[in-house]
Each structure stands twice: as structure tokens, then as C-alpha cells.
Image (spheres, rainbow, N blue to C red):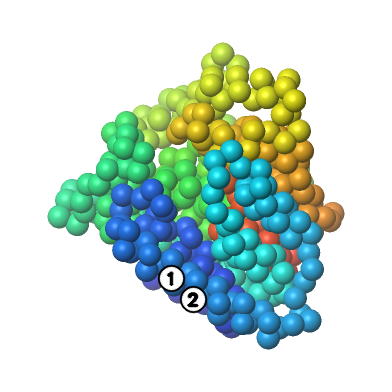
């Protein structure tokens, strides 16, 4: 209960606009809102979509009321470029995504204080839903099968263990925690980024919840991002370097000699090197690799083959290479590159912030679809949160 109390407590009351934005981000994160979900009906998805439109209208009203307080930021450029490229440079014709453009522009121009509040509200959602997921994991281990049902995974390759308030993906006989997200890797990436955005400050009990949830997701991205931030942050002082090296030594002993749970063993196997690659690197395949090489040596190298080409060429692959294939080098640089530039400009000479931004863009390798509200809330809100963490009390 102390964790829940610490998570919910705050000395400031966020604006209604921040609450609306956070609510949109939360709905956007839900597995039951995803178009290919097997966890809900079309009716539920339509209801959630209507709620999103209502929240967008309320947010726009709040933004108009703020007027001169709105910020003209560099984040507007990559947002517009990405949405327009997705429509005008499309391999498979589809409608212009007005909703996505509107939502991302709204978070981009929010005043800094509202970005921080949006981030805090979204962080609370992830912590609370992660805590519920941890409790569900305990129920699963206790064999309380009457509390859940089995549902086909959205890719059809395995199943969900659906507790209705949290989900698990069964993989190689291992239940991997998804929380309320559609994939364990999604939860693991978000949890890692939220921990990094808080400077890996484990005095905040919510970070322990995120760490345990990320661990139970058995996400390769979670372990790599948290490890990178921990090691990189440690180089700021000799004492921290010694602690980091000692921790890595203990970890090595555990991996080498201690009997490990199946889930941990699965992660270790994915981290092993072979043929110049990490065993768990499933973010590309031979078809996609060959297509990218061919595109770079063709006349399409600047603008690619159009949005949707990569997914039509090969399925079940989530890779940054897909966006290079779709948008070409110029389109990729104008979207992902300008987003990175805007973030680095916000960071300045703040080293912890720089490490967070580096972690965020490293995560693109595993989960490249960052042009969505949850990731924008974490990046834009996380940057402002870290810059102002001493000024505003949050947990």
C-alpha cells in the first residue's frame, strides 16, 4: 500500500489539459485498443475511439484557452514530416491520419508544466497497472486458473493468459508479463524508459514496481536499456564505477553458477553472441535486409518505396529498417533524424538527460514505432520532468 500511496501522492494538481492528454496516451497504450487485438471486440474498440475523439476535442479547447502559453517547438517538424510522408509517400493508399497528427501536435506545443503533468499521470498508470500485473503473476504461480482465460495471441503464434486486468504472453512455456500492453516487449521498453527518465532513482518506490514488471516481461530491450543507463551513469564518479563493476561481477557469478528460472535463462540465451549477432535479435530477416541493400543501390534510395511497402514485403518484423525502406534515407532523416535533433537541443549539456535521450533512441532498434502519443509523452514529458525534478515534487 505504501507503493500505491507514494505513486498517487503529489504536491501539485495537474491541469485538465494534462489529464486529457494522459488519458489519450493511456487509451492508445491499451492492448484492447489495438486494431489487431484478440482481447476485445470491435464494439469496445469503437467505444474507446469515440472517447479518444471526445478527449481530443476537450484538449483542443484547453489549448485554445491557454493561447500565448503554448510553445512553438522543433518537435512539430518531425511530426508533420512523418504523418505527411505516411500519406503522400504511400505504397498502399490510405486515408490521411488527422487524428495522429492532431494528437502529436497537441503534446508538442503544450506548456512545459503540462508536459510534466502528462508524463506523471502516464507514469502512474504504468506503475499501477504493473503492480496489478505482478499480483496476477503471483496468482498464476499459485495455480488460480479460475481467474483467467486463454486467448489467442494477436499474431496467432501463441496465447495470452488473460486476467482481464493484466495479460501474459506464453512464450516457450514462459508467461511473460504484458501488463495492459499487447506485447511483453512493449511493457519492458516503456518500463525501462520510465526508470531512466527518473534517473534510475530507486528512492521512488514506483521504480521498483517498474523494475519487477520489466523483469517479469523478460524483455531483452528492458535488460539492455536499464543496463546501459546504469553503466553509463556510473562513469560519473569513481565510487559509482566500483559499484557498477561489482554489480556486474555478481551478475556474472549468478549467470555462470546459480540455478536460474526458465525466464531468466531464456533472456541469457537471447543475449548470447553467434555469427556476429545477438541470438535474441529478431528485428530483421533476410528478406528485409536484402530489400534495404537493393533499395540503397537503386534510384529509390532517397525517398524509398512508400509507406507500407515493408509490411507488404515481409510480415511479423518490427525494424527501423522498415522505415528506411519505406521513406528512404531522406525521409528517414527528416522524420527520425529531426526528432533526435529536437530532443538533443532540449537536452543541452545535461548529462543524465542526454543518457535518457540516448536510451530512448536506442529503443528504436527494438520498437521503431515512436511516432505515437505514449512515446511522445515519455520523450517530451520525460525531458521536461528530468529538467525540473528538483523544482516540482512528484512522488
User: Quick one: label 1, few (<14), some, or many (20+) residues within 10 Å?
Assistant: few
Point out residue 2 in the picture as x, y percentages from the top left corner: 43, 71
* Mark sitting on residue 96: none
View extreme (left): residue: 146
- Residue 92, can we see it? yes
Label 1 residue SS: helix
Give the side of residue 357 with respect to residue 218, left or right: right
Residue 345, above or below 172: below
* Mark sitting on residue 50: 1
Residue 288, above or below 121: above
Q: Nearer the viewer, residue 77 or 218?
A: 77
Label 2 residue SS: helix
Quarter of the picture holding the N terminus: bottom left
At x 32% / y 59%, what residue is drawn?
A: 42
Give the side of residue 317 with respect to residue 195, left or right: left
User: Quick one: label 2, few (<14), some, or many (20+) residues within 10 Å?
Assistant: some
At x 74% / y 82%, what residue is drawn?
A: 67
At x 62% / y 77%, what residue is drawn?
A: 60
Mark 2 to mark 1 CA distance (whole Å): 6 Å
Point out residue 386 in the picture as x, y percentages from the top left corner: 70, 62
- Residue 253, can we see it? no
* Mark sitting on residue 54: 2
Q: Nearer the viewer, residue 7 or 202?
A: 7
Q: Nearer the viewer, residue 389 or 171?
A: 171
Disc 2 + disc 1, Cβ < 8 Å: yes
Label count reads 2
Amino acid at each position: 500500500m505504501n507503493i500505491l500511496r507514494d505513486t498517487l501522492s503529489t504536491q501539485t494538481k495537474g491541469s485538465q489539459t494534462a489529464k486529457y492528454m494522459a488519458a489519450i496516451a493511456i487509451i492508445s497504450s491499451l492492448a484492447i485498443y489495438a486494431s489487431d487485438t484478440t482481447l476485445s471486440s470491435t464494439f469496445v474498440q469503437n467505444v474507446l475511439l469515440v472517447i479518444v475523439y471526445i478527449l481530443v476535442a476537450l484538449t483542443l479547447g484547453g489549448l485554445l484557452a491557454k493561447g500565448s502559453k503554448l510553445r512553438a517547438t522543433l518537435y512539430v517538424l518531425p511530426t508533420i514530416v512523418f504523418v505527411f510522408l505516411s500519406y503522400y509517400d504511400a505504397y498502399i493508399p490510405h486515408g490521411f491520419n488527422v487524428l495522429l497528427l492532431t494528437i502529436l501536435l497537441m503534446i508538442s506545443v503544450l506548456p512545459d508544466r503540462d508536459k510534466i503533468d502528462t508524463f506523471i499521470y502516464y507514469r502512474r498508470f504504468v506503475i499501477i497497472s504493473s503492480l496489478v500485473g505482478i499480483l496476477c503473476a503471483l496468482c498464476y504461480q499459485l495455480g488460480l486458473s479460475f481467474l483467467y482465460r486463454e486467448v489467442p495471441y494477436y499474431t496467432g503464434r501463441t496465447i495470452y493468459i488473460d486476467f482481464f486486468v493484466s495479460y501474459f504472453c506464453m512464450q516457450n512455456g514462459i508467461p511473460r508479463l504484458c501488463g495492459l500492453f499487447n506485447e511483453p516487449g512493449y511493457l519492458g521498453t516503456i518500463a525501462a524508459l520510465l526508470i531512466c527518465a527518473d534517473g534510475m532513482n530507486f528512492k521512488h518506490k514506483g521504480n521498483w514496481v517498474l523494475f519487477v514488471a520489466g523483469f517479469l516481461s523478460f524483455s531483452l530491450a528492458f535488460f539492455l536499456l536499464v543496463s546501459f543507463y546504469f553503466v553509463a551513469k556510473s562513469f560519473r564518479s569513481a565510487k559509482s564505477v566500483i559499484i557498477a563493476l561489482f554489480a556486474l561481477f555478481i551478475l556474472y557469478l549468478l549467470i555462470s553458477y546459480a540455478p536460474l528460472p526458465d525466464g531468466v535463462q531464456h533472456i541469457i540465451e537471447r543475449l548470447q553472441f553467434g555469427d556476429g549477432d545477438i541470438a535474441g535479435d529478431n528485428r530483421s530477416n533476410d528478406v528485409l535486409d536484402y530489400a534495404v541493400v537493393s533499395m540503397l543501390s537503386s534510384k529509390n534510395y532517397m525517398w524509398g518505396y512508400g509507406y507500407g511497402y515493408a509490411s507488404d514485403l515481409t510480415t511479423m518484423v518490427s525494424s527501423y529498417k522498415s522505415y528506411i525502406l519505406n521513406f528512404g534515407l531522406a525521409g528517414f532523416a527528416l522524420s527520425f533524424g529531426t526528432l533526435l535533433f529536437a530532443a538533443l537541443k532540449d537536452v543541452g549539456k545535461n548529462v543524465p538527460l542526454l543518457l535518457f535521450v540516448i536510451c530512448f533512441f536506442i529503443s528504436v532498434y527494438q520498437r521503431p514505432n515512436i511516432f505515437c502519443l505514449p512515446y511522445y509523452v515519455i520523450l517530451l514529458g520525460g525531458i521536461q520532468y528530468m529538467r525540473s525534478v528538483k523544482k516540482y515534487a512528484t512522488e
